Amino acid sequence: MSGVNIGIVGCGAWGKNHVRIWSELGYLRVACDLDRNRLDALRAQYPSLETSSDIEAVLAREDISAVVIATPAPTHATLALQALEAGKDVLVEKPMALTVAEGERLVETAERLNRILMVGHVLEYHPAVKRLRQLIAESALGRIRYIYSNRLNMGRIRTEENALWSFAPHDVAIMLRLMGNGPDQIACYGGAYVNHGVADVTMTNLRFPGNVFGHIFVSWLHPFKEHRFVVVGDKQMAVFDDTLAWPEKLALYPHRVDWVGGQLPVAHKAEAALQPLEEAEPLRVECREFAECIVSRERPLTDGRSGLDVLRILAAAQESLENEGWNVNPTPQADSKTYFAHSTSIIEAGAEIGDNTRIWHHSHVRAGAKVGRDSVLGKNVFVAPHVHIGNGVKIQNNVSVYEGVELEDHVFCGPSMVFTNVINPRSEIERKFEFRRTLVKRGATLGANCTIICGNTIGRYALVAAGAVVTKDVPDHALVAGVPARRVGWVCDCGEKLKLTWDIQRCGACGKAYQQVDEHELAAISDSELLSVS
Ligand SMILES: NC(=O)c1ccc[n+]([C@@H]2O[C@H](COP(=O)([O-])OP(=O)(O)OC[C@H]3O[C@@H](n4cnc5c(N)ncnc54)[C@H](O)[C@@H]3O)[C@@H](O)[C@H]2O)c1
Ligand SMILES: [Zn+2]
């Protein structure tokens, strides 16, 4: 093919396979590596091969139309971007980048400059995976129930990226391709033994839409090599074992479950049927695809966008790994959203959330709830249907705002404070229709661990002390404390405690003037009123 002139950047353990294949295909023009010993060894093997240790010089060459990047993972994003900006088509090894933001930048740059961007998810080009795709498309496996990959071996311990980033990109790429959609929940656990902070073993559990589950188990501390990919369907089960010889790599098991007398499920085991495959080296198929796309300007199967989908899953798994396996939803935020919701939070369709509001880990906003703008919902906050929350409200961790509660603008709810919505709950009696209204007025503060019994109103700028239990209405500006809560003073709009006196007084912090009218009322006095009094 004319116009296919390849430069390879990074000719180490994996890059030298690219050198072999691209030189056999006849498209290799230059091999580039920082390590001159590597280049010497390559020239000994390929006497006519031109080599270079200067990537800038390679990228500046007009006779090089495309580059393959097979350097260590942390350099991928930078080098791929540099190559795209130099006008080259790029095949970058997996993982395409180490952050989603870097991946997005690569995709955006390739699209803007009209360059081919391909990611080296080589197993997507494996004949067994191609056959699996066909089988699933023909519905030969039936409905998929479970899908997993074990990629285990002893060695190639990496120090820069962990086992998840080193091995799992392949498994994620295949799963996304076979399932046709991504998981909506991911949990990943792992252990780092050789190198502090670099996981050697990870187990990622995935949940796909439609009750399909899966796992990806990777390790470089395993007694023997196991590369096994299994798809459990309700008609047949498929096993792709890449350690076996070609005729045995892909096997189908038409196992069945029968219901005896409609009562008892009985498993029927069937003989495995080996699937004939065309024998082809996956990397060679991948390289051919890249060459064809350079000429045709079509998108490769494993283009930048599909690489980015894989990256999002890896990033979600990494987030879970760093947080003891908590569940992460990897679905990207729709761009139209003007608020932030952490990936572990659930915002039901039909919930209304204002601009600039931030919702943190594991919080849940039900359909029909309204949250204003510039508000913050901390971790594990629950907002029930029909609840209205105003603008600039801050809710600390572990607070449930039940139906019947309304929070006006700028209310502050301290950590683990409690709202109730039924006055006399009984487990045996449904009291859904007896919810009492609890109104918290503008600017009020509800201290940590306090409890607000339903049916009461908390006045404007009132302050409920930590641990108090509020059993009756709280006047505006009142400071209440204790169990049951009693008024122990007054507070200014700014939160400063006022002196207990009947005289007109100014707040020591902000200067606002107040006068107590009676035991239940504090009146704010404007400066003009003050003048006329004095
Ligand atoms: N697709 C696959 O199945 C597969 C398999 C193995 C490795 N890989 C990927 O290939 C990449 C390389 O892995 P490896 O095992 O060959 O590593 P390696 O360390 O053996 O080789 C990396 C090479 O890159 C060179 N290099 C580093 N920075 C460079 C730069 N700025 N310019 C030019 N050369 C530079 C190094 O000198 C070294 O020769 C990794 O990202 C890895 O994830 C992919
Ligand atoms: Zn004040």
Image: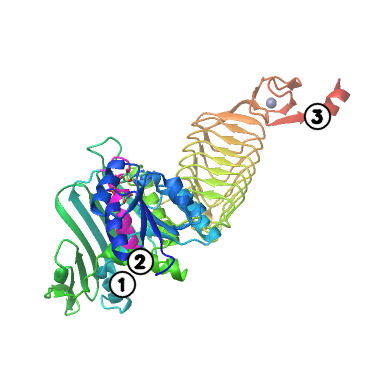
Tell which circle, 3 or 1, labels the residue nearer the N-terminal end.
1
CA neighbours of label 1 inside 10 A, class few (<14), some (14 to 19), many (20+): some
Q: Is residue 164 magenta?
A: yes
Q: Residue at x 38, y 64 (%)?
A: 290
Residue 255 falls in image quadrant: bottom left
Per the image, the residue denoted by label 3 is: 526
Q: Which amino acid, mark 3?
A: Ser
| Range drawn in magenta | 158-178
The span from disc 3 to disc 1 (Cα, nearest Å) is 75 Å
The quadrant in which the N terminus is found is: bottom left
Residue 509 x %, y %: 68, 22
Q: Within the magenta stretch, is there residue 439?
A: no
Give the residue type at disc 1: Arg
Asked if residue 200 lies left or right of residue 359, the reply is: left
Query: In terms of secondary structure, where does tag 3 sit?
Result: loop
Q: Which mark is residue 414?
A: none
Of 453 and 87, the residue lying toward us: 87
Tell me if label 1 and label 2 are in contact, CB under 8 Å: yes
Q: Is residue 338 above or below residue 298?
A: above
Task: From the image, tell me which residue sits under label 2.
Answer: 177
In the figure, 203 relative to 440: above or below?
Answer: below
Task: Return the mark for residue 133.
Answer: 1
How far across and down, in percent of the image, does residue 226 sit?
A: 17, 56
* Residue 121: x %, y % from top left: 33, 59
